[in-house]
Amino acid sequence: MKYGKLSRYIGRLLFPILLVGCVEARHSQSDPLGDSELSKADKVQVGMDRKAVEEILGPRFSSFYKGNPSTNCDSFIYNVAFDARFVHVWYQNRGVRSVSDGHPGICAIY
């Protein structure tokens, strides 16, 4: 019976830790602009053209075209000194459709 009580005690200790870990992981996945202070991605607005985006984020690092030439993605690098991350800007019909940051790689790889 000693081991039964011990395992329940350990379970009671670990459950809150695991629960917090799951909540944190879910938050980071659902927030497309987690690093916006570093990446400036929060300044990009839906509908902007490439020139306006490049004025905010700087020159694009790479471009990726996904089948349809009217839908593409540009990657912008930031946080180079510590752990390089990328902003992904998806365009449709020459205007920004969506923007997200914190990606570990460019659009075509990630």
Image (cartoon, grey):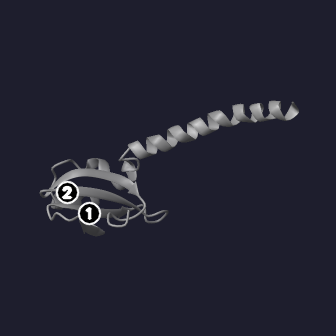
**Quadrant location of the C terminus?**
bottom left
The answer to which of 84 and 11 lies nearer the viewer is 11
Horizontally, residue 67 falls left or right of residue 100, namely: left
Q: Position of residue 47 (x, y in %)?
A: 15, 49
Task: Looking at this view, name the residue that lies furthest to the left.
Answer: 93
Label 2 vs 1, first from the N-terminus: 1
> Which type of secondary structure does the marked residue at label 1 adopt?
strand
Horizontally, residue 17 falls left or right of residue 74, namely: right
Q: In the rendered image, which residue does mark 2 sit on?
A: 91
Callout 2 crowding tier (Cα within 10 Å): few <14, some 14–19, many ≥20? many
Q: In the rendered image, which residue does mark 1 sit on?
A: 74
Contact between labelled residues 1 and 2, with CB atoms less than 8 Å apart = yes
Q: Position of residue 33 (x, y in %)?
A: 36, 47
Q: Which mark is residue 53?
A: none
User: Which amino acid is tagged 1?
Assistant: Asp
Q: Position of residue 4 (x, y in %)?
A: 81, 32
The answer to which of 18 and 42 lies nearer the viewer is 18
**Quadrant location of the N terminus?**
top right
Q: Quadrant of residue 31?
A: top left
- Numbered label tally: 2
Identify the residue shown where x is 26% and y is 63%: 74
Cα separation, mark 2 vs mark 1, equals 8 Å
User: Which amino acid is tagged 2?
Assistant: Tyr
Q: Quadrant of residue 2?
A: top right
